Amino acid sequence: MRLRLTPRNTSFFDLLGDSARHLVGAADLLGQLLGAERPAREALAGQLRDAEHAADESTHEIMRRLNQTFVTPFDRHDIYGLASALDDCMDFMEEAGDLIVLYRLGTLPARVNDQVDVLRRCAELTADAMPRLRSMNDLAEYWVEINRLENEADRTYRKLLAEMFSNGTDAIELMKLKEVVHALEAAADAFETVANLVETIALKES
């Protein structure tokens, strides 16, 4: 670890942790939304939007602190990138939930639940990893596991698309469902981006 002779504003660690914890709640709400009947989905989508707004506030606060802080815990460009990537995770999950309600989709394929299960695990691992940025210790297992989960998400996505186009008969419904599963896949990609950034930061700081 490099020796630092200047004080650092460590509030960024708390703010990044807050952002990651919002993701855990959002992934759980998304899972509930998938299993809910149509009348209950709208309320859950509203809660998901509230979670997205709360996450936005955490992101905005990180940006404000970056503009006000001279010495940051690590490279300010990396902090910006990490905050933005966490925000992307939330945005894609919220998008998927919103589309399910807006498109009035019925019962979703079982593999959509598999996609969300991966996102739940990614969110939990990310929330667990953010506090460890303070010491940069024990982070390798995090980014390795996120990479494995993203690969699993890719396979699920491809199988899901294949099943949809093999079994589907309604072109409009297929288009609607494809947008949802694409948003979920984008969320998994965004979690991998977060993990890649954490790996880069840890290597820089080692």
Image (cartoon, helix red, strand yellow):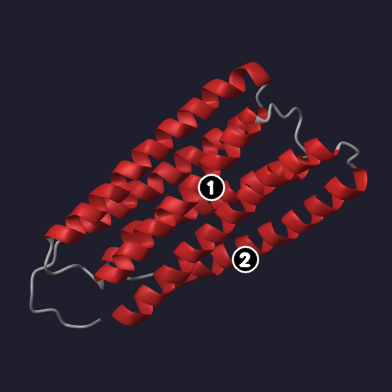
Quarter of the figure that contains the N terminus: bottom left
Residue situated furthest front in the rendering: 172
Relative to 46, 202 lies left or right: left
Expressed as whole percent of the image width and height from the top left, the position of residue 15 reads 27, 51
* Residue occupied by mark 1: 92
- Residue at the spot 21% in from the left edge and 68% down from the top edge: 73
Question: What residue lies at 62% left-to-right and 29% top-to-bottom?
Answer: 102
Q: Is residue 103 above or below residue 15?
A: above
Q: Residue at x 81, y 55 (%)?
A: 159
Q: Amino acid at mark 2?
A: Arg
What secondary structure is marked by label 1? helix
Q: Can residue 10 be seen by looking at this rendering? A: no
Q: CA distance from mark 2 to mark 1?
A: 20 Å
Give the image location of residue 10, x and y in percent: 18, 60
Q: Counting residues from the N terminus, which is met first, the one under dot 2 or under dot 1? A: 1
Q: Nearer the viewer, residue 143 or 45?
A: 45
Q: Residues within 10 Å of mark 1 (few under 14, many from 20)?
A: many
**For residue 189, which numbered disc appears in the image?**
none
Measured as percent of width and height from the top left, residue 88 is found at: 46, 53
Q: Quadrant of residue 38?
A: top right
Q: Nearer the viewer, mark 2 or mark 1?
A: 1
179 lies left or right of 120: right
Picture quadrant where residue 109 is located: top right
Q: Secondary structure at mark 2?
A: helix
Residue 144 x/y as whole percent: 54, 70
Dot 2 alpha-carbon crowd within 10 angstroms: few under 14, some 14 to 19, many 20 or more: few
Image vertical order of residue 56 relative to residue 65, above or below:
above
Circle 2 sits on which residue? 148
